[in-house]
Image (tube, grey):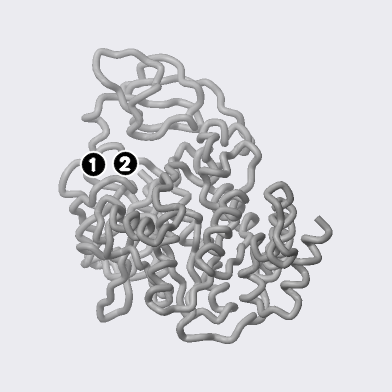
Amino acid sequence: MLAAGSAAAALADGASLLEAAAIGPHEVAAELGGLSPGKFHAADLAADALHRALSEVVSAEGQPLLSEQPGRALVAMSGGVDSAAAALLEQRAGHEVVAVTLKLWADQETDGERSCCSPQAVLGARALAHSMGLPHFTLDLRDEFRGAVVDHYISEHDRGRTPNPCVRCNGQVRFDAMLALASRLGAPALVTGHYARITRDAEGPLLARAADPAKDQTYMLCAVDPGELGRLRFPLGEVTKPEVRALAAEAELPVASKPESQDLCFLSGIGRERFLERHGGRADAPGEVRDSAGRSLGTHRGHRRYTVGQRRRLGVAAGEPLFVLSKDPQTNVVVVGPRTELAAREVSVEEAVLYRPGSQVDGVKLRYRSTAAPARVEASLPAGSHTNLTVRLEDDAFGVAPGQVACLLAGDRVVGHGTIAA
């Protein structure tokens, strides 16, 4: 181990920042004249120690680290096929690619192999970047993520709401931090593997839905400030997921067939209920299940386990399917009823931001996996922040959950967002 550490130090001595960020265990082993499989772990540890030091350098706010280079791009790499394909496309376009992975969460109960931002994911993304010949940095945002995203997620559940932490993370943590790092590393552009496009009108850039509707991620990006879009690139916005996998397979990337993670990064392998038990502070308590007329139907296991629109695991029997209609955290009552009672034509939205005047809004997405519904807001509303606004739907929407995000659309373009209040 001492020899491997000395080798890593020797490789880094006199190297530029980007050269040091490209040093991995294979370079350490080569510096030692080669290592047997049984001793290669020492090279892993030495390389990891070097990159922990580099992480401290780039995670600390400060002066620019590198002068700006017009063709340089910082690419967010999670260790999955989408971000790897985005980096590959940037390489093929002739750009100087620098990779970054965010460390957002570490929990001994979380399945780090299935999380995009865990310590294990960092190691996998770094190895992938190095295999592609890319320098790699780790940006440690655990404190920022806990404060802005996880604590909010917990408090929203305590309020009886169903938050969307990914929208909040993208809008308040990830992109701001990565763009700041890109500036410090002299990279004019930040590139991610999201399925989204950027379009422009007379007032500037806006997000637009991806060519692959099955993978479109504009809902998750709707809180990203349009003022930042001029520095962003989404190379996968015009391609489909099968095309991305084919591209990765043709380039012999080891993640070409890697399964996608379906969990929130801090819930991987643990689930919402267990997570809230461990981190939520307030314990879930059983309470009453009632219908909309106030009749008692049974007992629930804790209101935080349920969301508006939920049908399964209600714990009550009835002659027709029942759905969660609302929750009252003050009385710990969950109200259920038939699907017809879920119907909504008006949705109250708080903390709303319009990127364009309200007259342009013609649709809304009320959940990530939902389709866009024809809708309007008050035409006289100007662009800017609004404490509240009302979204009026042309058709009934079912299971509109307070705490979720309303993504406001003008055709394929994202023109605003807010949090569903009621």
| Residue 118 image offset from top left, x and y in percent | 59, 49
> With respect to residue 316, does 377 lie above or below?
below
Give the percent coordinates (x, y) of residue 369.
31, 45
Distance between the alpha carbons at the discs numbered 1 and 2: 7 Å
Badge 1: few (under 14), some or many (20 or more) residues near its Cα, within 10 Å? some
Per the image, label 2 sits on a secondary structure element best described as loop
Q: Do the residues labelled 1 and 2 touch (CB within 8 Å)?
A: yes
Q: Is residue 23 above or below residue 343?
A: below
**Whether residue 155 is visible:** no
Residue at the (53%, 36%) spot, across then down: 269
Expressed as whole percent of the image width and height from the top left, the position of residue 382 reads 30, 70
Vertical position of residue 21 compared to residue 106: above or below: below
Mark 1: amino acid: Ala
Residue placed most toward the observer, 83 or 318: 83
Residue at horizontal 26 percent and vertical 81 percent from the top: 202
Q: Name the residue under label 1.
A: 397
Identified at 57% across, 58% down, the residue is: 127
What residue is disc 2 on?
400
Name the amino acid, label 2.
Val
